[in-house]
């Protein structure tokens, strides 16, 4: 089976930062710690942390002993919400942004199929939380992948 949908690096880093914070629930974590552990640019993580704070996923504290930490429990952070917040638009083709009058019948049908596929993707993610990612054992997944 071949899968090719790819989320942005920003979304990837957002999820990694949330996972890291969920794994360190009683600590103020620094951007530097996440950057070094995941080998991610600090500049990118600063943008991610700012975004996640604005979205209400984390809080920050300046000064010695400060850092960032989750604002809500991992079980209250829905993966579909995080991905949709970080991705913004889940448009797969330019034709998905056009009105029906601007596209031909084939493109209209393709648009309909893609909209349904995106909705199925979001629906399948919406049953999972950040807690699902951090509470699973090594090599386990929340749902068995089709063979």
Image: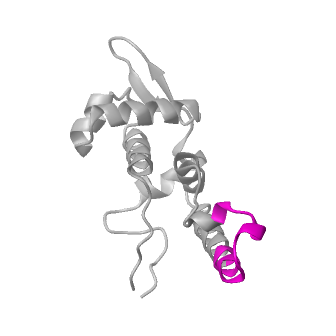
Q: Is residue 68 visible?
A: yes
Does residue 20 appear to the left or right of 75 in the view shown? left
Can you say whether 3 is above or below 72 in the image?
below
| Residue at 43% over, 48% down | 15
Question: Would you say residue 111 sits in the magenta stretch?
Answer: yes
Camera-nearest residue between 113 and 26: 113
From the top left corner, tell me how far across and down residue 138 is, in percent.
31, 63
For the N terminus, give its image quadrant.
bottom left
Camera-nearest residue between 28 and 121: 121
Examine the residues drawn in magenta and state their main secondary structure: helix
Question: Would you say residue 62 sits in the magenta stretch?
Answer: no
Camera-nearest residue between 81 and 111: 111
Q: Is residue 70 visible?
A: no
| Residue at 52% over, 30% down | 53
Q: In which quarter of the view is residue 118 placed?
A: bottom right
Q: Which portion, as a residue range, is magenta? A: 96-112
From the top left corner, tell me how far across and down residue 68 is, in percent.
42, 27
- Farthest top residue? 63
């Amino acid at each position: 089976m071949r899968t090719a949908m790819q989320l942005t690096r920003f979304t990837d880093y957002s999820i990694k930062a949330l996972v890291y914070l969920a794994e360190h629930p009683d600590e103020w974590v620094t951007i530097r710690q996440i950057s070094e552990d995941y080998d991610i640019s600090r500049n990118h993580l600063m943008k991610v942390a700012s975004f996640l704070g604005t979205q209400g996923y984390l809080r920050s504290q300046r000064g010695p002993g400060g850092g960032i930490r989750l604002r809500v429990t991992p079980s209250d952070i829905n993966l579909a919400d995080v991905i949709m917040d970080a991705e913004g638009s889940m448009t797969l083709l330019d034709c998905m942004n056009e009105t029906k009058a601007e596209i031909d019948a084939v493109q209209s049908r393709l648009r309909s199929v893609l909209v349904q596929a995106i909705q199925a993707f979001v629906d399948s993610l919406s049953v999972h939380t950040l807690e699902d990612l951090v509470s699973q054992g090594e090599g386990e997944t929340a749902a068995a992948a089709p063979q």
